[in-house]
Image (tube, grey):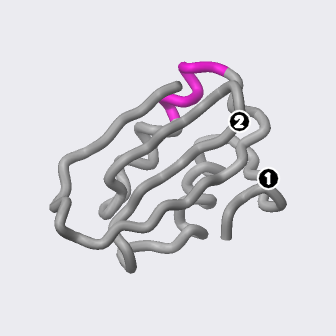
């Protein structure tokens, strides 16, 4: 499982999104996704688990939408299974 974070003000309220990515199967893919998502302002922490095909993103509440996360994942080249994504 790849887990990465960036520095942010830990006193800010955070939200969490868990997104299913069926094609997430390798650590390299998890690192690619983490790098792309951590470049978004407001994203604080990423946990990508190739075994469960789940990506969990912690971000500053109100700083972005889950649609921005999904679109970024798609732009990196991974389809999102919206039926398993938390909404």
On the image, the x and y values in percent for residue 41 come to 31, 61
Task: Identify the secondary structure beneath mark 2.
Answer: loop
For this view, does 15 lie left or right of residue 24? left
Picture layout, residue 43 above or below residue 24: below
Task: Identify the secondary structure beneath mark 1.
Answer: loop
Question: Any mark on residue 81, and which?
Answer: 1
On the image, the x and y values in percent for residue 24 come to 69, 32
Residue situated in front as seen by the camera: 87 or 79: 87
State yes or no: residue 49 in magenta: no
Residue situated in front as seen by the camera: 46 or 40: 46
On the image, the x and y values in percent for residue 19 come to 65, 53
Pointer 2: what residue? 53
Question: Any mark on residue 18, and which?
Answer: none
Name the dominant secondary structure of the magenta segment. helix
Residue situated in front as seen by the camera: 46 or 32: 46
Q: Residue at x 59, y 27 (%)?
A: 29
For this view, does 10 lie left or right of residue 79? left
Q: Residue at x 75, y 47 (%)?
A: 79
């Amino acid at each position: 499982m790849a887990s990465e974070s960036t520095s942010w003000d830990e006193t800010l309220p955070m939200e969490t999104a868990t997104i299913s990515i069926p094609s997430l199967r390798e650590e390299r893919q998890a690192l690619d996704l983490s790098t792309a998502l951590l470049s978004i302002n407001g994203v604080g922490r990423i946990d990508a688990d190739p075994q469960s095909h789940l990506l969990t993103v912690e971000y500053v509440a109100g700083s972005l939408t889950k649609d921005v996360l999904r679109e970024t994942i798609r732009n990196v080249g991974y389809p999102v299974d919206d039926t398993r994504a938390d909404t």
